[in-house]
Image: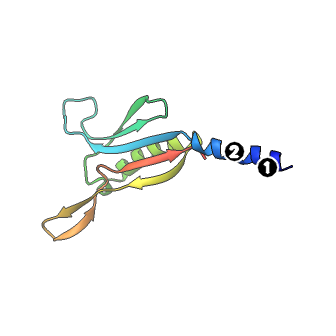
Amino acid sequence: MKKLLFVLAFAFIGQQAFSQIYIAILTDNQNPSSACPTSLLTKIDPIGNTTYDCISTNFPIADNPQALIDLNIGLNSIVSQGYKLIKVTSPTSYNLTTNSSIYDLAGTIWYFAIP
């Protein structure tokens, strides 16, 4: 019985160690001549394949509901594959006109993993 418990413990730990990570990052596309002249959601799957989703507006993204819809669709496409959000890295920018810190989605990175 102890051997079985020992084997199962290592099987569980091994499964967690080989978790697959999916990364998504939102950037402000600075190249207006590209196919996506607005904001860009870059998604990198565990194999290293990169896909790009155009977000329908530039920043600030919160001013346009369609941009939030596009972002939601892009992130939901990852979640629908069985990945769960494990971490979000969000930058903060400084607003010189109001002297306050404002939340900006540009540069936000979402990390997803298979549970």
Residue type at the position of mark 1: Leu
Q: Residue 97: which quarter of the image?
A: bottom left
As helix, strand or loop, the secondary structure at mark 1 comes to helix
For label 1, the residue is 5
Using the image, determine if residue 64 lies above or below residue 56: below
Dot 1 crowding, Cα within 10 Å, few <14, some 14–19, many 20+: few
Q: Residue at x 32, y 53 (%)?
A: 105
Q: Secondary structure at mark 2?
A: helix
Q: Is residue 34 left or right of residue 51?
A: left
Residue 75 percent across, percent down from the top left: 46, 45
Disc 2 target residue: 10
Give the residue at the far bottom of this rendering.
99
Hey, what amino acid is under mark 2? Phe
Residue at horizontal 36 percent and vertical 44 percent from the top: 25
Q: Is residue 67 left or right of residue 4?
A: left
| Numbered circles on residues, count | 2
Left/right of residue 44 with respect to residue 39 in the rendered view: right
* 32, 15: nearer the viewer: 15
